[in-house]
C-alpha cells in the first residue's frame, strides 16, 4: 500500500485495513476464502450494517493465519495523518502479536523512526537513503529520454538536477 498526502481524506484506518484485507483475499481467488470471513460479511450485509474497523481487523487476522508467511508493505507512512498513523501502527502491533507469521516492510522519512520504534518495538530497521550520485544518474537517464531533444539547454538541465537533488533530502 502507498500512502499519499493528497488522499488523506480516504486514507483512514478502516479503508487501509480494508485494502490490505482485500489484497490478501484476492490471493485466494474464488477457490478458498475463509468461511468465517464469508459468514461475517454475509451477517453484516443481512443486518444492513457497515463493516467496522474491528470487524476488518478480525477478518484480516483470520485471513493471515491461512498463509505460512505473509508480508504487509506500506510505503510513505509519514504521508498519513498523525492520528491515522498512530492507530495503524498500534493495529499492526496487534496483528503481529496474534499472527506471528506476518512480517512488515514499512517506509517513511527519517523523522518517524522514533514513532515506529516506540509503537512497534521494531526488531530490525534499515536506514536507506538515496545517494546524490544515484539521483543524478537517474535524472541524466530520464533527461536523455526526452522526446523533444534540444528543447532544454545544458544550463536548464543542470538547474533541474540541482533542484531535485536538493529537494530529495536523502529520501
Image: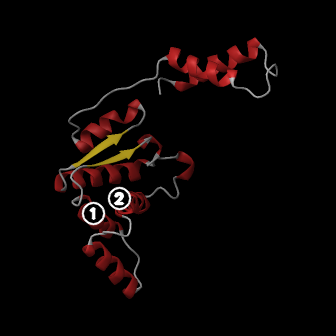
Query: Which residue lies at the image location 34% right of the left edge and 52% below the top edge?
Result: 88
| Residue 105 vertical position relative to residue 42 in the rendered view, above or below | above
Q: Which residue is the extreme one toward the top?
A: 154
Query: Which residue lies at the image location 40% right of the left edge and 53% below the top edge?
Result: 84
In space, the residues marked 1 and 2 are separated at their CA atoms by 7 Å
Q: Which residue is the extreme one toward the bottom?
A: 46
User: Foreground residue, 82 or 16?
Assistant: 16
Q: What x and y, as percent, mark residue 128?
A: 38, 26
Q: Quadrant of residue 18?
A: bottom left
Q: Along the horizontal axis of the image, is 135 left or right of 14? A: right
Q: Which residue is the extreme one toward the front?
A: 31
Q: What x and y, as percent, mark residue 166?
A: 57, 20
Query: Which residue lies at the image location 79% right of the left edge and 22% below the top edge?
Result: 149
Q: Along the horizontal axis of the image, is 131 left or right of 88? A: right
- Residue at which label 2 appears: 24
| Residue 84 vertical position relative to residue 142 in the rendered view, above or below | below
Find numbered disc 1 in the image and state the secondary structure of the residue it sits on.
helix
| Residue 88 vertical position relative to residue 33 in the rendered view, above or below | above
- Label disc, if present, on residue 63 of the rendered structure: 1
Q: Along the horizontal axis of the image, is 75 left or right of 105? A: right
Find numbered disc 2 in the image and state the secondary structure of the residue it sits on.
helix
Q: What x and y, as percent, mark residue 46?
A: 38, 87
User: Foreground residue, 93 or 128?
Assistant: 128
User: Foreground residue, 15 or 43?
Assistant: 43
Q: In which quarter of the image is residue 152?
A: top right
Q: What x and y, as percent, mark residue 97?
A: 17, 52
* Image marks 1 and 2: residues in contact by CB distance under 8 Å: yes
Q: In which quarter of the image is residue 142?
A: top right
Mark 2 Cα shell of 10 Å, populated few (<14), some (14-19), many (≥20):
many
Amino acid at each position: 500500500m502507498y500512502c499519499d498526502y493528497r488522499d488523506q481524506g480516504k486514507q483512514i484506518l478502516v479503508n487501509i485495513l480494508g485494502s490490505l484485507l482485500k489484497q490478501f483475499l484476492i490471493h485466494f481467488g474464488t477457490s478458498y476464502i475463509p468461511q468465517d470471513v464469508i459468514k461475517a460479511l454475509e451477517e453484516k450485509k443481512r443486518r444492513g450494517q457497515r463493516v467496522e474497523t474491528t470487524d476488518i481487523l478480525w477478518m484480516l487476522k483470520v485471513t493471515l493465519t491461512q498463509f505460512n508467511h505473509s508480508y504487509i508493505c506500506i510505503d510513505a507512512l509519514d504521508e498519513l495523518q498523525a492520528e491515522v498513523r498512530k492507530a495503524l501502527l498500534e493495529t499492526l502491533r496487534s496483528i503481529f502479536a496474534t499472527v506471528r507469521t506476518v512480517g512488515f516492510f514499512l517506509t517513511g522519512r527519517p523523522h518517524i523512526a522514533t514513532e515506529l520504534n516506540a509503537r512497534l518495538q521494531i526488531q530490525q530497521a534499515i536506514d536507506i537513503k538515496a545517494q546524490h550520485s544515484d539521483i543524478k544518474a537517474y535524472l541524466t537517464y530520464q533527461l536523455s529520454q526526452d522526446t523533444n531533444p534540444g528543447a532544454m539547454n545544458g544550463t536548464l538541465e543542470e538547474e533541474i538536477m540541482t533542484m531535485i537533488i536538493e529537494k530529495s533530502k536523502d529520501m
